[in-house]
Image: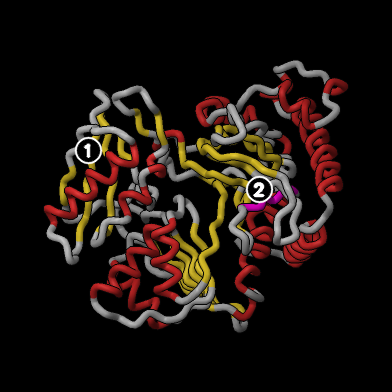
Amino acid sequence: MGRSATDLLDIGLGLARVYRSEYWSKDRIIEYQERATVQQLRYAVTHIPYYKDLEISVDSIVDTDSLQLFPKLTKRIVQEQGERLCNPAIVENSPFKSRTSGSSGEPTITWFDRKSWNFCKYALKVRRTMEGGAPWRQRQLLFDESAGVDGQVNPPTRNRFGPFQQIRLSVFTPIEEQMAILLELKPTIIYGTPSGVKELCDYASARKLQMPSVPTVFLSSELITDAVRQKIEASFKGRVIGVYGSTEFKDLAHECGHGRYHTYFQSAHVESLSDNDQAPGPLLITSLVNKAMPLIRFDIGDYAQVGDDHCACGRNSPYLSNIAGREIEFLQLPDGRRISPYMLTTAVEAVPGLLKYRFIQKRDLSLHMEVVLSDSELSSTEQIRKIRRNVQLALHSDIDLPVHSVENIDRSAGGKHMIVTHLP
């Protein structure tokens, strides 16, 4: 969809607003979030059918603590309530919507009004891109997670706006074609998933191909393990920047130079239902700008902690830490423990020659692994033995863990590498 001069002005003003507020004092950020949250909650109970039915008094909404008056919103509720979570006067004529891939098994549609679409989808994206330098002087290779239609992989699309170039490429494109386009474009920015970009690095390494230097690699959609970060930074001789976002809210946070995922407090309020200061809890997100479909206390399905102390980068904004992944990926151990699989990634990825892996859990709680191995100084038998033992040591358990070597592990329909698969 083309953008009018009014849209471009709106995006520019939104970008300026983000820049002006990034280094506000902590008190000013709190004041802003209080005011924006109260306005959004009062708007919801006045204009949105679902929230009007809760019969929450406008006068009872006075600060961010008023969020506790609202029940947690789940993806299932969004599916069932649909347009009752929307302002019908806006959605009726609005073309701005996003649909999730359904990788969690619960696809949803989120509607936006024009102003929030311009801010969340474009202004925040431009701000994040500028971590890699002025966006109009870049060559960007963007990996799209969509699978195409009727089994046909979407062909590459090329865009050029003055000196800025972008190639959008499906992650389902054969790896040799991905590599050819990478070497042709010699991008200054890459945007993709950790597993997808690492796969390119592994492909080049196995064939002794010289990778171009890429100053900035943005990674999203999956957690970034230390081993994957180091592999990608060494291959491209650049900096990896983690991005946290969702279809429902667009960009929500990105890493600063000190490794903290600072949230865009201008567009969303983030809370964690953590039981203590040391453990991550479910993340609940409240949109502060979307008037078409103002999701309040939306359970995004991820676990993390939220901090707000001053960062060495100069920001005082809230940030995400101890990100533990999606609830649907958690493993249930026979001894009753329920853990994030990312507790095990360092142990698993320490084994030489491991290209891909996933944990597979059955309903009876039995657990096994599939791994894709490459040649190394270890035999495949020794690689598997080390993987199994490293996991047992990380769990402090002699858990029975069959490990099977396979030729490949396919991506999900949503283009992601799922580290956990639950089987009936």
Nearer to me, 203 or 238? 238
Measured Cα–Cα span from mark 2 to mark 1: 35 Å
Q: Does the magenta stretch include residue 357?
A: no
**Can you give x and y, in whole percent of width and height, for residue 33 in the image?**
79, 41
User: Are the residues tagged 2 and 1 within 8 Å (C-beta)?
Assistant: no
Nearer to me, 143 or 318? 318
Residue at 49% across, 60% down? 219
Label ID, residue 295? none
Residue 190 appears left or right of 386: right
Residue 390 appears left or right of 133: left
Label ID, residue 319? 2
Q: Is residue 263 magenta?
A: yes
Label ID, residue 368? 1
Write down the region rendered in magenta. 261-265
Q: What residue type is labelled 2?
A: Tyr
**Can you give x and y, in whole percent of width and height, for residue 409 in the image?**
25, 51
Which is the main secondary structure of the residues drawn in magenta?
Answer: strand
Badge 1 density bin: few <14, some 14–19, many ≥20, Cα 10 Å: some
Q: Which amino acid does label 1 sit on?
A: His
| Earlier residue among tags 2 and 1 | 2
Q: Quadrant of residue 383?
A: bottom left
Would you place residue 115 above or below residue 228 in this image?
Answer: above
Nearer to me, 236 or 109? 236
Nearer to me, 63 or 126? 63
Residue 267 in view of the camera = no
Badge 2 density bin: few <14, some 14–19, many ≥20, Cα 10 Å: many
